[in-house]
Image (cartoon, grey):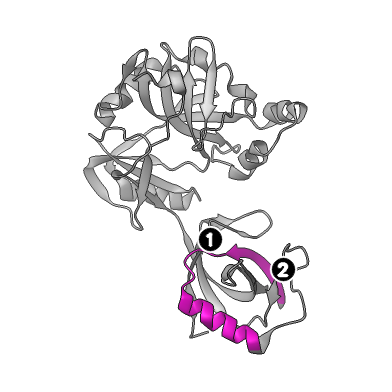
Amino acid sequence: MDFFVDKNISPMLLEEEKEPFDDENYIFELKLDGIRAIAYLEKDAVYIRNKRNKELIDIYPELKSIFKQAKKPCVLDGELVVLNNDGSPNFFALQKRSLMTDPLRIELEASKNKVHFVAYDILQLGKDDLTDLPLLKRKEFLAKNIVENDLLAISRYIVGQGIKLFSLTKDRGLEGIVAKEKNSRYEIGNRSKNWIKVKNLIDEDFLICGFALDEDNNIKDLILGQEKKKKLVYRGKVFLHISKEEQEIITAFALKNQSKKAFFGDISGDIIWIKPELVCTVQYMMLTKDGAMRQPVFKGLRDDK
């Protein structure tokens, strides 16, 4: 199969584990906080597609020349990232870039916050489909074919020592690690237990200040806050994993404790505000610049607080 023809590859997906591990049958890489993408490096052009197969090269025009870094045309799986001065990924700068549509603004931002492509894997080299080869063999082809520069890099890895690498990511505030079985083949579009992600996540308690309902009158979003210096501070929304039982507790509480006061003025939509007395635990990756949670998951109500 020639992947250059249709350019519609969906990247291989990962299972998730809560704890890091050591295993000599696995390699371990940094999990970069960016946008997963497939790059098609042809003889004189570059095409970069995200998970939904949307073409991105016009949004990140600084990457149009990275085909020159490949000795032969190839198809790469990797991550789009913007880097801080210390080399850590800046997802918020990347997200800002991804939403731009005006070519002049894009060019200006590209000169200030360059997007880099970090290659994890190589799926095709010239006319050869490499997806059935063992992972470490594909890594060899990747290293031999790509000449790195300031816009195109190859992901580094270590063998066997997942716990040590994960500890390093925690110390440096990075997203986490990815474990990949050494001999794993590349399964296009599939989620495989041969590739595992372990993320740095935070568990924290929040006050439920209100909620929004969907068309079936089920809770769509919980509006969360925290008390900071005797002031109620907005911490974002959460909707994942709220059970029916917990929804019933929250709605029953709201019937007796609805508030006429909107605690946070810039929240859009029809919100049912309630007295901020119910406490819940939410797991999330990090706080955004405006103090809201990134990738929050509801873990449950606290009946002891």
* Quadrant holding the N terminus: top left
Distance in Å between CA atoms under marks 1 and 2: 21 Å
The image quarter in which residue 277 lies: bottom right
Closer to the camera in the image, 142 or 38: 38
How many labels were placed on the picture?
A: 2
**Residue 181, image x, y percentages:** 26, 39
101, above or below 62, in the image? below
SS for dot 1: loop
Let me know if residue 96 is in the magenta part: no
Whether residue 229 can be seen here: no
**Residue 208, image x, y percentages:** 61, 75
- Among all residues in the image, which is located at the extreme bottom? 256
**Residue 304, image x, y percentages:** 48, 86
Residue drawn at x 25%, y 26% is 133
Residue on which the image places disc 1: 296
Horizontal side of 114 relative to 269 (left or right) equals left
Residue on which the image places disc 2: 270
Residue drawn at x 63%, y 45% is 92
267, above or below 227, in the image? above
Let me know if residue 240 is in the magenta part: yes
Horizontal side of 115 relative to 169 (left or right) equals right
Residue drawn at x 42%, y 30% is 9
Which amino acid, mark 2? Answer: Asp
| Region in magenta | 231-255
Which amino acid, mark 1? Answer: Pro
Whether residue 232 can be seen here: yes
